[in-house]
Amino acid sequence: MIEVLIRVLPFFALIGVGYLSGRSSFLSEEGVAAITKFVFYFALSAMLFKFASNLSLSEIYSTPFVLAYLSGTTTVYLLAYAVAMLRKVSRAEAAVEAQCAVIGNTGFLGVPLLIALLGPKAAGPELMVLTIDLFVFSSVITILITAAREGRVHWRILGTLGMGLLKNPMIVSMGLGVLWSVTGWPVPRPINDFMGILGGAATPGALFAIGASLAARSAERLEVAGWLSFCKLVLHPTAVAIAALLVFPVDRFAAHVMVAAASLPVAGNTYILAQHFRVAPQRVSASILVSTAISVLTVSAVLAWITAA
């Protein structure tokens, strides 16, 4: 555990540097937004394209893997939704809380952290988790909130969801990478080197951006944030581990990557969705702050278990 914690600490130290930079006003909100935009549209997209284009489809997609992740994640999603409804919050708020309980910071934190610690072989399973989160659960929250507000789901929402996915640079970069991989053509060295150089900025840039964005988070509704952090950091990886290691025939290494991805703290894009729909953004903000702080220990514990298994 201590050895893994020592390996993980530099990654979280980068988040801490970003947090201090944002908290001390060394960086303005516009500066933080610019760094985040660079990472999102350029550095991280280049990293995702490089990994996807150099992997075969079989190294990324696996039906047992998809079923295991979906079943484990859906179980925790429904639990968080049910607990929220028992507290008599609105259905829209329940959808946001359920999203916090299962959607981790896979893009900005998971991709650089897990690939660096578990090796390039972790890229395929990590990309699959990211794809499911973006395609399935980002769509589910939009549909649930729309249904809660309007009493029905209009077919036009499907067009909105489709356009949202097409405008997401992570989806586009992974899709283009997979399409290139399917052709069987080797990626030309200049392109590969270019993506490698640009993608190299993703790890420090993404971690710094996470920290800087946390500086603007508030810690209100701590009892709810604590519950949602428990769901995300403990219940989600546990449910996924049971599904991947005991129920479905998932490759052991891929299962370990899946569990590690499930152990990540609440994703920042959940706050963006909550703010967009104007549904409980402070609750999400607190959950991101609390879960990220605690994840230094919980993610280290999960990685220690994985490497020892």
Image (tube, grey):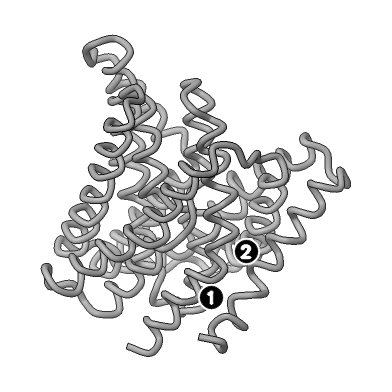
The residue tagged 1 is 116
Q: Are marks 2 and 1 in contact (CB under 8 Å)?
A: yes
170 shown above or below 262: above
265 shown above or below 214: below
Residue 144: image location, x then y, percent:
28, 26
Quarter of the image for residue 197 reads bottom right
Q: What residue appears at the point 45 percent right and 65 percent down from the top-left corner? A: 51
Q: Is residue 151 left or right of residue 126?
A: left
Q: Residues within 10 Å of mark 2 (few under 14, many from 20)?
A: many
The residue tagged 2 is 203
Q: What residue appears at the point 43 percent right and 44 percent down from the top-left corner? A: 172
Secondary element under disc 2, as helix, strand or loop, is helix
| Type of amino acid at the residue the image marks with label 2 | Thr
The numbered mark at residue 11 is none
In terms of sequence position, does the residue under pointer 2 or pointer 1 come before the other?
Answer: 1
Residue 89: image location, x then y, percent:
36, 25
Q: Is residue 293 left or right of residue 215?
A: left
Name the quadrant of the C terminus: bottom left
Quarter of the image for residue 136 reads top left
**Distance CA(mark 2)–CA(mark 1):** 9 Å
Q: Is residue 233 left or right of residue 294?
A: left
Q: What residue appears at the point 31 percent right and 21 percent down from the top-left corner? A: 159
Q: Pick whichever, 301 or 184, lies toward us.
A: 301
Q: What residue appears at the point 27 percent right and 23 percent down from the top-left corner? A: 158
Q: Pick whichever, 109 or 226, lies toward us.
A: 226
Q: Check the image and name the residue furthest to the top.
A: 150
| Type of amino acid at the residue the image marks with label 1 | Ala
Residue 67: image location, x then y, percent:
16, 57
Secondary element under disc 1, as helix, strand or loop, is helix
